Image: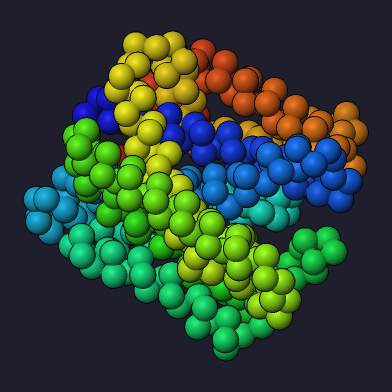
Amino acid sequence: MKQRIIGFDVARALAIFGMVIVNFKIVMSEETGGHEWAVWFASIFEGRASALFVILAGVGVTFLTNKARQSSDTAIIATTRLALLKRALLLIAIGLALMPIWDADILHYYGLYFLIAMLIFTLSDQKLLILTAVFTLVFPILMLLFDYEYGWDWETITYPDFWTIEGFARHTLFNGFHPIFPWAAFLVFGMWLGRQNLSKGTVRKQFFTYALLTWVATEILFYGISLLNISDEASILTVEPMPPMPQYLLAAGSLAVVLITVCLAVSKHFADSIVIKWLSQTGQLSLTIYLVHVILGMGFLEAIGKLEDQTTEFALLSALIFCILSIVFSSIWLSYFKAGPLEFVFRKLANR
């Protein structure tokens, strides 16, 4: 079990690194661009790192709720639901506080996903998979009923009426950066994935093989479709995260499973490696690092006049420096404390 936990932490570190790369690139060089290789490299992580992050959150929910689910004790289940509620409310509060300076925040969505998890963690494996499909398939139905682009100012990539009731509901449920429909599917799938015996090598290999085949087939199929130049359908026949069509969830979700199984296997075989130790420590502080990369990382770049109109190469360099500093900070912090600053607050709040 120890190795399994280390593997998930390593995957979480990779997810947060990918999100830092994407976010720095969006803020610093979305308008200016850069060399083709740099733009291509940064684009690899778009919608994939955050999907991995949310799936891992679902895995974490399963670990948090296993005792209550397996006991069937109503008192323990109620206590666990309350703990998830506290975490959800804190995430929503922190995320909404970030929104004035960071429109693409995922933490308040994260909190909303936790509210859903609070209600469904006692469901069977089969029902979790059904719910995953429901969240995935409701979105294209909403696309038929509503205008996906409504509410957006695409020139500035902002959502002017976010703070209205209607705008908040629309952004949260349907056409924001990580709307509940369909993004909650990633969390629910992660809850199911966390129940599988991934500590067993044969199970990992099966998941890796099926996920790899699914990911490659989906990417090739929709890349081929894109070459047909069907202009009227271009926006919905891609594996891009906006709009998040079912094929995007399939591609991003299967890639996440590939990465998770690889991280679990590598962490098991190289458990004594200093690199694995550093990455696992960084993964344990993922929520803290997410908050810091917005407030301190982007704040510092803004203070020195380097936050906007930079090349993609400079954005990647900045992300690399931040990720290295995150590894150093995590290693030092966990040599003195058992959890990261934000993670400590969550633990204290949930255990009260």
User: Is 81 left, or right, of 240 in this rendering?
Assistant: left
User: Could you say which is closer to the camera, residue 188 or residue 73?
Assistant: 188
Visual colour scheme:
rainbow
Give the quadrant of the N terminus. top left
Residue 247 seen in this snapshot = yes
User: Is 271 left, or right, of 323 in this rendering?
Assistant: left
User: Could you say which is closer to the camera, residue 262 or residue 294?
Assistant: 262
Residue 42 on image: x %, y %: 69, 41
Give the quadrant of the C terminus. top left
Q: Quadrant of residue 178?
A: bottom right
User: Could you say which is closer to the camera, residue 96 or residue 22?
Assistant: 22
Q: Residue at x 34, y 57 (%)?
A: 189
User: Could you say which is closer to the camera, residue 321 or residue 169?
Assistant: 321
Residue 6 seen in this snapshot = no
User: Is 283 left, or right, of 124 in this rendering?
Assistant: right
Residue 157 on image: x %, y %: 77, 61
Residue 258 on image: x %, y %: 40, 42
Q: Is residue 128 above or below residue 145?
A: above
Residue 3 on image: x %, y %: 27, 25
Q: Residue at x 41, y 17 (%)?
A: 277
Q: Residue at x 29, y 50 (%)?
A: 193
Question: How many numbered marks does the figure carry?
Answer: 0
Q: Residue at x 29, y 46 (%)?
A: 207
Q: Is residue 235 above or below residue 110?
A: below
